[in-house]
Amino acid sequence: MENGLVNEIRSSAIPKQFRDNTPYSSLSVVEVAALTRKYNVSGHQVEIEALQAGIVPERYARNLRTFSLQDQAVLLQSRVSVVGLGGLGGGVTEILARIGVGNLNLMDGDTFEDSNLNRQFLSTHKGLATPKAVAAVERVQAVNASVVVEAHIEFLDADNAAGLLAASDVVVDCLDSLKFRFILEVACKTAGIPLVSAAIAGVAGHVTTIFPEDPGLKLIYGERDRIPEKGAEASLGTLPQCVTILSALETSEVVKVLLKKGSLLRNRLLVVDLMDNTMEVLKLQ
């Protein structure tokens, strides 16, 4: 079947040009869907086979030139866990699905309420009281049906963290609780998984990347046994423009970790303040 699938991928591809006039072979979303039905395989598998054959799934054409075919294949074969599917988590999930991270593991035990509508992209009037994890799956499938998505309608805690995060290449912290953020960090360090963490308050926020051997969150918040339950968000609220920017910055770190490219925010804190139009990187020590 695999040879037949690859041969049909090749015969279904059409010649196109990137915007710099470089030629490439393209496989459309329609053809991917047709091949999944004909060969009873996932779109995920079809797109990986296409990339390995040197053919570009057209949905990723604008990724390429910055990414290589091999980079895109790495993303498709990667598994990222997003913990918390509110403002940050909804934005991160959307971008990861669009950029082509092939396996998304999404978790949140909460449901949508009215106050989420100002910033949480997964929330809608009709979706109020819907579990956030259910809405996230529906959105991923609508955006990129080739992504394999798994959802958990539960909150992460010290007892279930290891099971929920198993086999992740990267974990993304989109939580609003300092207590559970530290629990997540411990679980990631124990499992040897890199963690990308962000927090928002009003129109300011920060992001950092923590590898298992790094000091991590205590360099930002202090010792775990002395932290409050909530951060500054509790008193300053959260605005959508800040959520959007921090979601993008978190996703950027995830992609760099997966591709082993670029400069990571390890032992550094990228701080954004939209009111003053400032962005600076602080060394954590």
Image (spheres, rainbow, N blue to C red):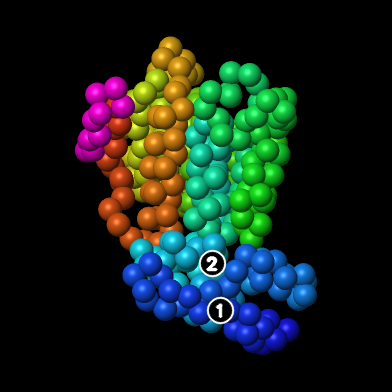
Q: Name the quarter where the N terminus is drawn.
A: bottom right
Q: Nearer the viewer, residue 208 or 161?
A: 208
Q: Residue at x 54, y 67 (%)?
A: 58
Q: Position of residue 18 (x, y in %)?
A: 41, 70
Give the numbered dot on residue 139.
none
> How far is disc 1 from disc 2 in space, using C-alphas?
10 Å
* Left or right of 184 in this view: 153: right
Compared with 98, 177 (above or below) is above
Q: Amino acid at mark 1?
A: Ile
- Check disc 2 and report the residue beneath it: 58
Compared with 201, 15 (above or below) is below
Q: Nearer the viewer, residue 20 or 193?
A: 20
Q: Nearer the viewer, residue 141 or 250?
A: 141
**Mark 1 or mark 2, earlier in chain:** 1
Compared with 118, 164 (above or below) is below
Q: Residue at x 51, y 79 (%)?
A: 15
- Check disc 1 and report the residue beneath it: 14
The residue range painted magenta reads 274-285
Which secondary structure, mark 1? strand
